[in-house]
Image (cartoon, helix red, strand yellow):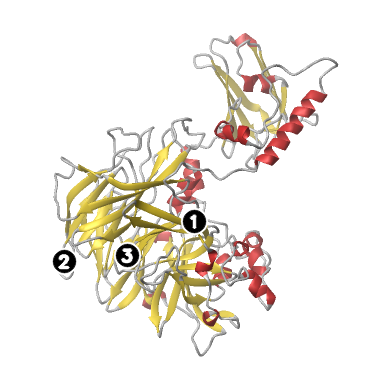
Amino acid sequence: MSRPAELLAPNRALMFPRFETYRLQSLDPDEDLGVHPLPGAGATQSRVGHNSQQLSFKEVRSRISWDHLDTLDNRGVYVDAEWNVVGFEVDDKFEPTFSTLASLPVPISSSSQQAEYPRALPLSPTTWAVSSGSGSLYILKVSAPGEGLTGRFIARYDLPAADGSSSASPFLLYAAHKEGDDAYRLLLCRPVVSTEAEASKYRPRKTVFDLIEVDVLTNIENGIDDEPQTLSPSWSLRGNDLPYWASWAEGGWLVASEDPFSDGPVVRTPRPREQEGAKAARQHEARVSKLGLGAQLPDDVEAPLGAGAEADDEEEEEEDAKVFPFSWTQNETSVTIKIPVPGGTPRRDIALSIAPEYLDIKITSASLSPALFTFLERSRHSFWSEIDADESTWTYHSAIGEIEIELQKLEGDARWPSIFVPADDDDDAEVEDVPETFGASTLAAIRDSFNNVKTRSADEPQGNHPALPGLLREELDYDLEDDDYEEAQGGGGAISETNSGTVGRSVLLGHVKITLDGPQATWPRQPSSILSLPVTSAGPDLPADTGVIVKFAVDGLLFAPEAGSDPSRAPWIHLGTNPALGFVLSSKRDLRLVRHLTRMDSGVAKTVVLGFESGSGNGQGNAYIYYPPSADLPTSARQGVIGVSGSDRGGLLGVGSVDVGGRNVAVALCERALVVLKGVEA
């Protein structure tokens, strides 16, 4: 089933067509911010084990956006760097008190599976569900509010592996819903790795994802690690991506995901097969045209498949990683090339010379791999940049059948994007670049830099920044006047596909309704661009009048399901507007998490949006605060900027909110500090 786009229709009465600007309101770090060191080793997001598998892009993206902090009332819980479950309480003076509640066993990533991030999810003021990251779910009982924060595990449950093996299946814990006094539904998601093509450290694993609901009773104790019980899934749906966000609302699960989950076979997003077929046909015709009179291609060279069903049948094979004739790595001073050769090849059959501008190599062997044979058809290969030939060496390791070449870069040489450049007479269709092989430390640095874009230095001129055009192109093209306004609304006032852009996260807002016949999943035809997710301290369910902020033109519109309605059929309510939110967020180059606090004022939501920089690079990471306009001054609104993460506090890990004296106050978890934004409230 598909959900019509009219379910997210804006209310013009809540828009601010005359809005002009945000005006800076100063925030005093000494008065408006409380920084409190974390106990022990602090917190961390570096939990990915370096083994023989490489995570898929969607798994890496999910880990980057994962929130490591959960809160309820005036309490919060996180899992620290040593796998201790640490809780804190914030008193009326905004001072937190930390306490170690329990300890998780350290998960071990193997060649067959990767550990996931742990999470502590609040179920009630005295009960939390804690996922270990390695396939176990713990029930944590904590003391009642006002009695000092203590806790202990009372039960453990393991999720069976998807293949039926005895090992537990790692999963991510997303959301919870209370069914009775001690009965809860939990929403999990686990990766299911394809066994058709094994992953390696050079090739990402092929993964689909199971969305699973399980039921637990929190008043039952078991032997915990000695006698754990098994989690029995109530149902599961399969999809191509991890959820971006999930919560319980109106009789089912609200799930924001780039791809839908369903109970049928997973259908991957189709690639442009017509273009691929046409390219293959041109290459085939070019090879035929080079043949002499009466000649033909070998029998094992087939004509290219079309763009129909036969081509689709070979999609999995086409996606397999290619076999390259060599591998190469580099550092600041040198480039290392490793060429595998057939075992038993004598050294006299290898002719290799290194010149400042090229490598000359010949190998005499009847058992060369196809990739290496093609590479050696041309003996001379020009380097990307000139090298110091006198300091460059090569070694033949006959025991393992490998030629290792060490090339010394010239002083001051930059990082090479490629190892060789094609010759002038090379056929572009036949020459393929070999990508660099990155070490574990380099891959970790790349993962950390995914959401850390270079900022403008102090001596850089105030002009167009390289990062700005791609982010602002859509926003700068908008001119929402008269007929343009109707067009941006999709004609009928609904958010349309032309409205989705690069700012925010483009997802499908689905609803999985629980019926007697099982889950009934409904997904929209068009995605929505989510700018901000809610942060509350009210419990596991999505509170009334709380929703997500969706991008509409340059604005951010707060939508929530109507109470007592079916979110898959009834229109969502437009509760409030943060004008120009998409525009101002697009200028931020290092945002990791964007969250909002909401309060109702005369039936209209007043939403404060907080955009947090990661703070994992050099310098401090800021929090950008955007307040809604007031009714008597609709042309402007307040904004604030204050340093939260970075430096001695470490990178940002999570954001939550605590109830302090009736105030909903934001808190930020960094690697070495808990930051209380006591001067910021909805």
Q: Where is residue 443 in the image (x, y as percent from the top left)?
A: 49, 42
Which residue has dot 3 on it? Answer: 541
Q: How far apart are marks 2 and 1 (CA)?
A: 40 Å
Q: Where is residue 21 in the image (x, y as percent from the top left)?
A: 58, 80
Q: How far apart are marks 3 and 2 (CA)?
A: 20 Å
Q: Is residue 334 visible?
A: yes
Q: Which mark is residue 617?
A: 1
Give the mark nearer the N terminus: 3 vs 1.
3
In which quadrant of the rendered view does residue 648 lie? bottom left
On screen, residue 17 versus residue 236, left or right, reads: right
Q: Distance between the residues labelled 3 and 1?
A: 35 Å
52 and 12: which one is in front? 12
Give the mark nearer the N terminus: 2 vs 1.
2
When the figure is inspected, residue 188 is found, relative to residue 488, above or below; the finding is above
Say few, some or many: other residues with alpha carbon within 10 Å of mark 2 (under 14 / 14 to 19 / 20 or more): few
| Kind of residue indicated by mark 2 | Ala
